[in-house]
Image (spheres, helix red, strand yellow):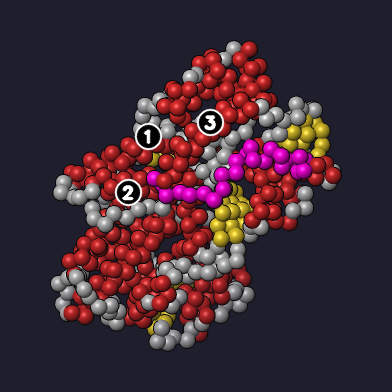
């Protein structure tokens, strides 16, 4: 049962709709006054009364019943005490009951709707570096979250596989490379060649590179074979990392895919009188909207990043008929997205409003000094491997007899890197620290994983037990129950706000409450058989929900730790 909705149904605040009221209801940190609370401050303007007075009036009118037993008004808050037994019964029934077949917290609200998610979008022949962590992990989480809510989801890797750098790469390869070395060194060898070109290339090589790029574009066989080879090497490299991060895509249509799809867009822009010439280039003037012009064609006729994004958006609309198309891309590209969204709007595409730039902050490393093969660039693979190594050390120290240590370390280490990008509000810049990320007592994935292992071990020792959910919960039990009850709302708002961090925080909150319950209440040696079953049911519910939540984030759960 959804208590917030239930409370909202019985409240009437002039001018505010029920959904809005339900959304405003919170679980207060101190629950001595109530289990749920409605802050009345935002109604003050609407009702032209003080929040304190509004709270008092609403409290006086509220029809208490078996479900919501007590209502009080304190300092502008309306506090509700609910039937604790009822909540625990309905929660456990939901987790175990028929609805559980679909998955607790899942829904079909997205039925018949499609969401495209453009994420990770790596660049061919360039490093897959720490800067790609957030887009990959956030995008992957959103992919699963929307799927869990019944949406059809299309994961798109908008590969950066277009541009003059490929001409440079071919030139560098011709001068300094050889097949075996590149085959062996893969992306690192390709990157070395590219870096070398940028430091050592002569005027002549620059001209040659432009010619190679032209050859790729004009369909020259040799140039295209080399290009395809570089692309293949890059993709087989990144796909291994995607596997470790549990990331998948439905489409790898990259920038190059739009080569023949740009001309119609340019024609349409011209027809609609939007294309203007400026210093030889073709642009769309965005000055009336307070933005610099959107460059469509350079003076040499070459297309740009924005041109390809325009073509891609139109293609996606035609192909998938999306209800929303998300771009999980760093905030550095804010302007780019505002610009090309605006151009689509000016073209009269009413669906331009359904394009969303899901912007996120930067990730850097605490020990920026970490040596890398290419100077300053930090490869994501190195961060993952190092974190897994450290996880293995810690696990070996803590539990030398653990079986499958490597497997556990992989889940813990990879999870820690991912959680680093998932725990804070996405727009914040993050400094990743191995020690903090692997702290068993911190607000970390390993803390949550360890809590799962603890719950699993209790259940294993318990053997068979019946589902029992009819107890009157004590304080620790009830705090845990209430935390678990937040899951469906958490998933929904994570999707609505494109904020997987809500789920990450939910995991830590539940883990903390479970641990308090675990240390304060005897589970296996409970006072009575009924209490024992109730606590075991609660333990099992916690494990199921935490596993589900971590899975939505793409993080694995070891059986034992
Ligand atoms: N490859 C680009 C980069 O690394 C990101 C592409 C994002 N997606 C898009 N449709 N522009 O910066």
The image quadrant of residue 473 is: bottom left
Q: Nearer the viewer, residue 70 or 403?
A: 403
Please say whether residue 125 is visible from this viewpoint.
yes
Pointer 3 or 1: first along the chain = 3
Q: Which residue is drawn at 41% across and 53% down?
A: 554
Q: Residue at x 64, y 44 (%)?
A: 337
What is the distance, in whole Å, between disc 1 and disc 2 at their CAs? 16 Å
Q: List x then y, in percent, for residue 173.
A: 53, 20
Q: Which of 484 and 205 is in front in this view?
A: 205
Q: Is residue 260 magenta?
A: yes
Q: Is residue 363 left or right of residue 519?
A: right
Q: In which quarter of the image is the N terminus?
A: bottom left
Q: Does the magenta stretch include residue 98?
A: no
What is the distance, in whole Å, between disc 3 and disc 1 at their CAs? 24 Å
The image quadrant of residue 519 is: bottom left
Q: What SS does tag 3 mark?
A: helix
Pointer 3 or 2: first along the chain = 3
Q: What SS does tag 2 mark?
A: helix
Q: Do the residues labelled 1 and 2 touch (CB within 8 Å)?
A: no
Q: Name the residue under label 2.
A: 411
Q: List x then y, in percent, for residue 207.
A: 66, 16
Q: Are marks 3 and 1 in contact (CB under 8 Å)?
A: no
Q: Say the numbered circle drawn on residue 382.
A: 1
Q: Which residue is drawn at 25% across and 42% down?
A: 392
Pointer 1 or 2: first along the chain = 1
Q: List x then y, in percent, for residue 496.
A: 54, 60
Q: Name the residue under label 3.
A: 229
Q: What are the residue bounds of the magenta stretch?
A: 244-266
Please say whether residue 376 is visible from this viewpoint.
no
């Amino acid at each position: 049962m959804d208590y917030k909705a239930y409370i909202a149904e019985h409240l009437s605040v002039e001018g505010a709709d029920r959904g809005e009221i339900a959304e405003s209801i919170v679980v207060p940190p101190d629950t001595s006054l109530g289990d749920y609370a409605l802050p009345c401050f935002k109604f003050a303007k609407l009702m032209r009364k003080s929040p304190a007075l509004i709270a008092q009036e609403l409290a006086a009118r509220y029809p208490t019943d078996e479900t919501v037993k007590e209502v009080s008004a304190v300092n502008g808050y309306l506090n509700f005490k609910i039937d604790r037994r009822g909540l625990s019964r309905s929660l456990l029934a939901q987790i175990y009951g028929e609805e559980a077949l679909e998955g607790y917290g899942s829904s079909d609200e997205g039925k018949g709707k499609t969401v495209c998610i453009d994420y990770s979008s790596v660049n061919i022949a360039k490093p897959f570096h720490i800067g790609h962590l957030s887009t990959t992990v956030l995008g992957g989480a959103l992919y699963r979250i929307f799927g869990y809510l019944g949406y059809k989801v299309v994961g798109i890797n908008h590969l950066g596989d277009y541009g003059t750098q490929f001409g440079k790469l071919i030139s560098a390869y011709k001068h300094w490379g050889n097949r075996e070395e590149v085959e062996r060194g893969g992306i690192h060898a390709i990157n070395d060649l590219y870096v070398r070109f940028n430091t050592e290339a002569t005027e002549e090589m620059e001209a040659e590179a432009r010619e190679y790029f032209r050859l790729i574009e004009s369909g020259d066989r040799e140039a295209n074979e080399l290009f395809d080879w570089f692309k293949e090497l890059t993709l087989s490299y990144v796909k291994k990392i995607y596997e470790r991060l549990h990331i998948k895509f439905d489409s790898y249509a990259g920038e190059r895919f739009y080569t023949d799809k740009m001309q119609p867009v340019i024609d349409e822009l011209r027809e609609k009188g939007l294309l203007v010439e400026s210093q030889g280039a073709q642009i769309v003037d965005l000055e009336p909207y307070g933005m610099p012009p959107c460059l469509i064609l350079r003076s040499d006729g070459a297309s740009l990043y924005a041109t390809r994004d325009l073509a891609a958006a139109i293609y996606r609309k035609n192909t998938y008929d999306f209800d929303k198309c998300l771009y999980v891309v760093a905030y550095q590209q804010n302007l780019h997205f505002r610009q090309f969204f605006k151009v689509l709007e000016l073209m009269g595409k009413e669906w331009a409003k359904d394009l969303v730039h899901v912007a996120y902050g930067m990730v850097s490393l605490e020990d920026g000094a970490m040596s890398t093969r290419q100077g300053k660039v930090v490869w994501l693979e190195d961060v993952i491997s190092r974190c897994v190594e450290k996880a293995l050390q810690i696990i070996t120290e803590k539990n030398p007899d653990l079986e499958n240590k490597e497997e556990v370390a992989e889940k813990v280490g990879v999870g820690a890197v991912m959680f680093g990008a998932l725990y804070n509000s996405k727009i914040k810049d993050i400094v990743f620290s191995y020690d903090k990320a692997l702290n068993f007592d911190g607000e970390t994935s390993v803390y949550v994983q360890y809590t799962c292992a603890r719950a699993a071990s209790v259940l294993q020792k318990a053997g068979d037990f019946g589902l029992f959910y009819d107890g009157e919960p004590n304080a620790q039990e009830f705090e845990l129950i209430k935390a678990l009850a937040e899951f469906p709302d958490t998933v929904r708002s994570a999707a609505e706000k494109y904020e997987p961090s809500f789920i990450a925080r939910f995991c830590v909150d539940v883990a903390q409450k479970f641990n308090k319950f675990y240390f304060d209440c005897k589970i296996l040696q409970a006072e009575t058989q009924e209490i024992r079953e109730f606590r075991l049911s609660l333990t099992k519910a916690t494990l199921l929900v935490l596993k589900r939540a971590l899975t939505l984030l793409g993080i694995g759960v070891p059986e034992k730790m």
